[in-house]
Amino acid sequence: MNYHEFTIQIPEAFKDALINRMTRNGCLGVIEQEGSLVAFFPGNMNKTSIVDDLEIIRALLEKSHQTGEFSYRHALLPEQDWNESWKKGFTPLDVGERFTVLPPWEQKHEDRINLVIDPGMAFGTGHHETTRSCLVLIEKYDRELAKERFLDLGTGTGLLAIAASKLGYKQVMAVDTDPLATEAARMNAGLNEVANVEIREGSISETSGTFDCIAANIISGVLMLLAPLIASRLGPSGIAVLSGILADQADEVLAEMREAGLTLKERFPDGKWVSLVVGKRH
């Protein structure tokens, strides 16, 4: 079997939206590289339909005056080359003081908390700045929290939920509006043998009660819309780790969180991105 490989240059702010769109349209998986995405599609898919969809993206970017950074190139790969390209894109990654993120085909690392992630068709392998930042911050605040309940909002591959389980949270809930993401998260939870992770299709409205830690690695606009719900689900001494925020959007997100009754504990920059740690105002 052959595979279509598309290497796509796109502005950083639009990467996640493009990944979600391609996934819905039959993409097998995406490797994120510096300044580009490498997307794989089955060889029996019509190349023209994939190109047409990319041209729709170009037209949308034109309206946003962002076309200068958008381009793509195509290659047809035999199965052996596809397997090698796919595996080379996901190498073990040490994050923070204790985590190692690695695919199933790599040897686990001794004396580390191993997070085994089969990238599949969902976002969140730990190689993106926003995911790394979430892991670092979850680990940093680990000893300050009660660790009864954890919520991974927009779970993707389930990485943050799995990390929380391995840190010792008693009850872990993961939600995502994308059914492909929840499927991938369930598979990865199985690979890591974490039995206390509950995965639901939907958003934060599918949850009840309060949480000691909420991790939300989603785009800024959604974070702002969900600010009141995030505040309502956060325990009195808990924290919310908010990521997926471009640096120039951080103040706007923070303003919505403050309006919802939350206060800033930490601003954590990583390249073009900023993560925010917020808690209840006392």
Image: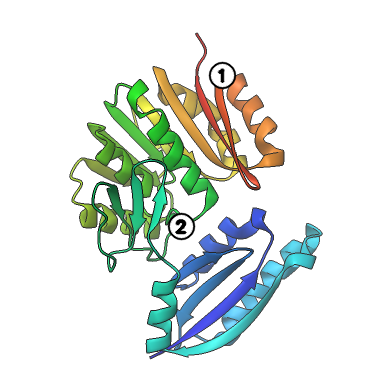
Q: Where 62 falls versus 175 (above or below)?
A: below
Marks counted in the figure total 2
Amino acid of disc 1: Thr
Disc number at residue 263? 1
Q: Nearer the viewer, residue 141 or 28?
A: 141
User: Could you tell whether 67 is left or right of 147 in the image?
Assistant: right
What is the C-alpha distance between the residues marked 2 and 1? 28 Å
Q: In the image, which disc is placed on residue 123?
A: 2
Which residue is depicted at the point 55% across and 26% down?
266
Q: Secondary structure at mark 2?
A: loop
Q: Is residue 158 visible?
A: no
Neighbour class for label 1 at 10 Å: few (<14), some, many (≥20)?
Answer: some
The single residue placed furthest to the front in the displayed view is: 111
Q: Quadrant of residue 221?
A: top right
Look at the picture and state if 17 lies above or below 3. above
Q: Earlier in the sequence, mark 2 or mark 1?
A: 2
What amino acid type should be assigned to the residue bearing mark 2? Phe
Picture coordinates of residue 160 (x, y %)? Answer: 37, 44
Residue drawn where x is 25% and y is 42% of the image? 197
Q: Nearer the viewer, residue 158 or 84?
A: 84
Q: Residue at image x 40%, y 65%?
A: 91
Image location of residue 47, percent across then percent down: 56, 86
Q: Are marks 2 and 1 in contact (CB under 8 Å)?
A: no
Most foreground residue, 210 or 130:
130
Quarter that holds the N terminus: bottom left
